[in-house]
Image (tube, rainbow, N blue to C red):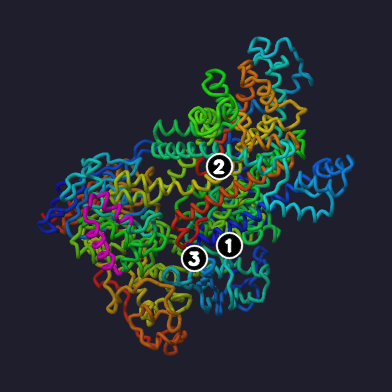
Amino acid sequence: MTAATQATTSTAAAAPPAVTIRDLTIVYRTPAGELPAVSGVDLDLPPGTITGLVGESGSGKSTLALSLLGAVQRPGRIAAGSIHVDGLGNLVELSAKSLQEARGGEIGYVFQAAQNSLNPLKTVGKQLLDLGRSHGVRDRTALVRSAKELLAGMGLDAARVLDSYQHELSGGMRQRVGIMFALVLNAHVLVLDEPTTALDMISQANVLKIVRAVHTERGLTTLLVTHDIGVVAEVAERIAVMYGGVVVEQGETADVLRAPKHPYARALINAIPRVSGDLSAARPLPGRPPTLGTIPTRGCVFRERCAVYAERQLPACVAEQPPLAPVADGSGRLVACHAVAVEDQQATGETA
Amino acid sequence: MRNLLVRLAGHLVRALVMIWVVATFTFFLIRLMPGDPVAAQYEKLVQQGMSPDAARNATRLTYGFLPTGSGWDQYVHYLWRLLHFDFGRSTQTLGVNASAEVLTGAKWTIGLVLAGILISFALGTVLGVIAAIRRSSGVGDALTITGSLFHAIPQFVMALVLITVFTVIWPVFPTDGNVDILVDPGFNGPYVASLVSHASLPALAYALSMFGSYLLTMRSSVISVLGDDFVLAAELRGLTRTMRLRYIARNALLPLFTIFALTIGFMFGGAVFIEKAFNYPGMGITLINSIGHRDYSTMNATFLLITAAVIVANIVADLLYTAIDPRVRRGGEAVA
Amino acid sequence: MVTAVEIPTGNTPALTPARRGFWRNLWRVLRRKPTRVAGAVIVALFVVMGVVGPFLYPANLPTDPGNAYAGPSGSHLLGTDFQGTDVLALLVTGSRYVLVAAVIAAACTVVVGTGIGLYAGYRRGGPDSVLMRITDFIITIPGLPLLLVLSTLWKYSNPLTMGLVLGVTGWGSVARAVRSQTLSLRERGFIEAARGLGLSTAHVVRKELLPNVAPYVAMNLLISVTVYIYLEVGLFFLGVLPFNENNWGVMISQAVQNGVTQTGQGLAYLLSPLVAILLLTLGIVLLVDAMDEVFNPRLRED
Amino acid sequence: MIHKKRSLDGATRESLDRATNGTGTDGTGTDGTGTDGTGTAGAIEARGIVKSFKARGDVLAGRTVRALRGVDFRIPPGGAASFIGESGCGKTTLGRILAGVESFDSGELVLGGVPLAGLAPRKRAPHFRRVQLIHQDPYSALNPTRTVESILRDPLALRAKQTGQSRAWIDGRAREVLDLVGLDPGYVLPRFPHQLSGGMRQRVVIARALTVDPAALVADEAVSMIDVSLRLGVLNLLRELRSTLGVSVLFITHDVATARYIGADGELYVIYRGEIVEHGPTETVLADPVHPYTQCLLSAIPVLHGVEQPGADRLAPTEPLDESQPEDGCLFAARCPFATDRCRTEHPELGHLGGTAHEHACFYPQRRSVVATPLADT
């Protein structure tokens, strides 16, 4: 735990993280008992940075994103851990009322573009007023004005958009309206859940450009949740890779992409076809990602598909899930792998 | 707005066609009746010594049908008179037009049906929302089971049970009729009280037999809306619970309009059972009596009126739906 | 990589597990909840009652005017009616007409409704709009008044005609629902794929579409039975139909006409058919709960 | 019983023979199509395919959307072609037309040397059967109420009936096609689709397509709904089928990288608003795109910073597609960063670039390096 804190403070200057997640465990009640979707996750979001959270289906990334708003949906619940948000305190301990005010107020959330995140029976403008009413905004004209500024800044005809129903907006427009709703009350933490899934390349590039722009303009702390490493690579300074409810690697995006340490991160990056370079470098990853019911309860969650385990058969891999620990190269990288830890020990042993 | 007018025009055309088909159907039904009552009446009058023309006229007045002439002539004549709301004369109540006979009954039926619908709709939708939101708790289960149970009980069974309980075992309500005949009609206390006490049980029977289906429909509609993305989005945007409930309820009510129209039709149709059980002199009783007395003019008029009521209810529901749902009202893809 | 593939010959592998395992599946799904077993038992009892029951009693039940409106007792388990006839005997002998008519009507509804719904949804275009106009028409015409009007022409004297008339006037909503399901299934890739593979329309309808609407159809078959029981019993209750065969509706009608609801005398006589109807409904509702699971492999597995 | 025991590579060779020569050697492949013996069996040729849709909803306005405005291409037997473009460009419609699922308004389609325009719809069906569509969504492409075994048996039983094969042939062939797609028949056959992963389902879909010995597979965003770590397996399978069975693969996608992975040695077609705006060997077009639309599209691909460096001429994202933009001149003019007055009034036709196989439809073709390249030190 403390190791993780040290690691991030060393990279992100002196500023304390805007969001600090410690030992977070989220379980879902199923007929087979309570199963963890997220187990013992530590994650820091340094202020003013975009962090990309990458994982496949069932990795727990969306559950983690929801927990940042204290909105894990039933039958899930936060079983352990804490989520400290700058200026709010520990979200896990907040009252329902303060949580409701924090959502949309301090922390903005943007849905996937393909999802219909607007009430189909009300215009955008009416829903904006509902938002204001829910958050006790007195000055309605100011609210509408800042909404219009945000929309215009994203290249939309603000007046027309406010007078539109959801079905009258295109996918790209809905996404921008979503961003407006997330930020109109001046939230300083922004969570984007699969913001570009189901968009084509050009729309995706547009949305990412906007995300980047509002992020810098408003000095946000942003978490971008996606299955697409390319999206993270394009906009995020930091990346966290999740698998089976666990963060397996975390670090500067360029570092991780250049030299991934965790076998899953490495395999995932190698499994992506590229637009240039050697095609034969791409390698498929055997097996399939685990679901809630099939995440191994003992040992490393990635063991079954792990090339390193297949080769070296470390007993520790079977015994316990490795903790997310800093690697010895001093890059501030965090990796949860027994093999990497052993290599580090050997390396330090040799130099000593 | 244009969408609304186009829709309305389409509805009217379809409604007219449907009423025409039903009218044609009853025309042939009555003419096909064993021993064709119209021809029988005509022949009887002629045998009694009336001139053929007089007999033809008299028969026509009674049934609204020409007893003689080509089938086509008779049919056109019948339709022409229907256009003038002339259904002929009642043969059970002498000297009264069939249309007047029906309207007397309709007055009572509409009152009952409206009362029943309002009560059951309000009860059913509110309980349906609760049943959906508390669906994983005992309250939700109990409501759902109650809903299915009441939904499954036939109207006449409900009526008979109510009668048995509230007039036999625990006699607090009058058994039958619409008003105490000993009370002076008019807008006075005793008369209104008598009206209300006579209407209470039948209206309750309607409400109890209908609220279950509203409850179940509302429940599944709310559950489906709860799964919509915008509900979670509203929560994540920090909308208050009240606000979110309002969003959910309004969206969930939309599909209920279709059901609403169907139930109105069903209630007019099913009025027969409850009116019979309570001997409440509405359209249902009019229909049964006309059939019992082989009063074809009244039967025809009642049947056509009930059909028309159902069609109108359908149109109104659809227009309401159009007015409420912006996806239909304001272009975009029509929601079927 | 390359391995010889042994082709099993002479045996018939599990070709159509869905069909062969239907009854076994049904049994397994029923056992999952005691309420379902109870439902199945109730329905089975009524079936036995309708099939065997009438043979247990003489064609003309004995009357005993001296013992009218008797309450339940050892000799008359459910009491007697206004003529002193045993109510249990009336109930048992009267079940056949009711059940046969309801089953015929439900079968009619499901066959016609599913057929028209599938055809209209699959063909779309012209045939679809014609069929749907007819369906709208059938749905909109108020059913009960129509049946009453028809009673001036038809005598509903035997369960067959009763069932057919009920079925012919009642298939509209099934057709509409099956059509809309078919339309949405059409958009699914597997229908397109089947046609792309050159499989015939008959195949697509029978093997791709039908299994997917089957749960809905089966549920409707059961629910229709209850609805038709209400309707026919209700028709007799209204007292406009002539009757020459004893059935539950006649019992209720007679009880009301003889003033049971006014005097409270012979309540058992009135309540017996009502309770029988409710019990049968309950049994069917409990069974319906199992249908979805029987037909949907996704729910069947744990 | 020649089918009693047969090795997989035997079956493979047989399929290969059939696909390339169009002649069944043992009677299993003679369904009478694609056997003109001129070596064009399996070739797919489109000439001026045009398709319009009536916009749904507003009946009175009756707006039509022109999905395809005269598309030409030819794909040799066993070839690979990728069609890329943003959503709404008509690429999906094109795939559906090739597979016979959708009709076309005008133009000519030649499948296996047989022109289809003159044929009655009934006569077209067997030819279209040689082109199988692999859907984007493997979840809806398989009937949820049936086991994999019964899904595969139906088309095989139809074949068996036509060619007089035995039941054993059906069983054997079902196992063969599963082997071909890398699935264990013993595991997969008795299972229902919902019991399989997305990747496995997509393999079953491909296996089902193989039951009719197709000349071509049209894969429409075939991996976009599959988990990232499983995608490459399915892509590799499509590549393998090309080389082992000689099936041509038409890959329709907005994801340029997967298009390249499938068809690096094939042709790349860039579609914009129902028109091909650029075409050429895949690697050539990616390395040296000359049409501004292609350049915009390729510029939009995220760069894997740390591993790749962005192309020197990478363009900023253009506005999204708007079908109401003018159709007079170049269809891309309104969004094009380089458009001139000529572009807005005159419509450029597809033409060859300096006598090469590289075609484009732009008045001002200009090579720009927009695609990211690998960093040297990795």
Percent position of residue A52, x then y: 26, 58
Q: Quadrant of residue B98?
A: top right
Protein chain holding label 3: D
Badge 3: residue crowd in 10 Å (few <14, some 14–19, many ≥20): many
Percent position of residue A251, x then y: 21, 58
Question: In the rendered structure, which amino acid carries the disc numbered 1?
Answer: Gly
Q: Which mark is residue B263?
A: 2
Protein chain holding label 1: D
Q: CA distance from mark 1 to mark 3?
A: 26 Å
Residue located beneath label 3 in the image: D219
| Whether marks 2 and 1 lie on the same chain | no
Q: Main secondary structure of the magenta part?
A: helix
Q: Quadrant of residue C186?
A: bottom right
Q: CA distance from mark 3 to mark 2?
A: 48 Å
Q: Which mark is residue B132?
A: none
On whether residue A144 falls in the magenta region, the answer is yes
Residue C203 shows in the view? no
Q: CA distance from mark 2 to mark 1?
A: 66 Å
Could you tell me which residue is drawn at 48 percent across and 75 percent down? D274
Protein chain holding label 2: B
The correct choice, above or below, for D110 with respect to A193 in the image is below
Residue located beneath label 1 in the image: D10
Percent position of residue A87, x then y: 15, 50
Question: Which label lies toward us, 3 or 2?
Answer: 2
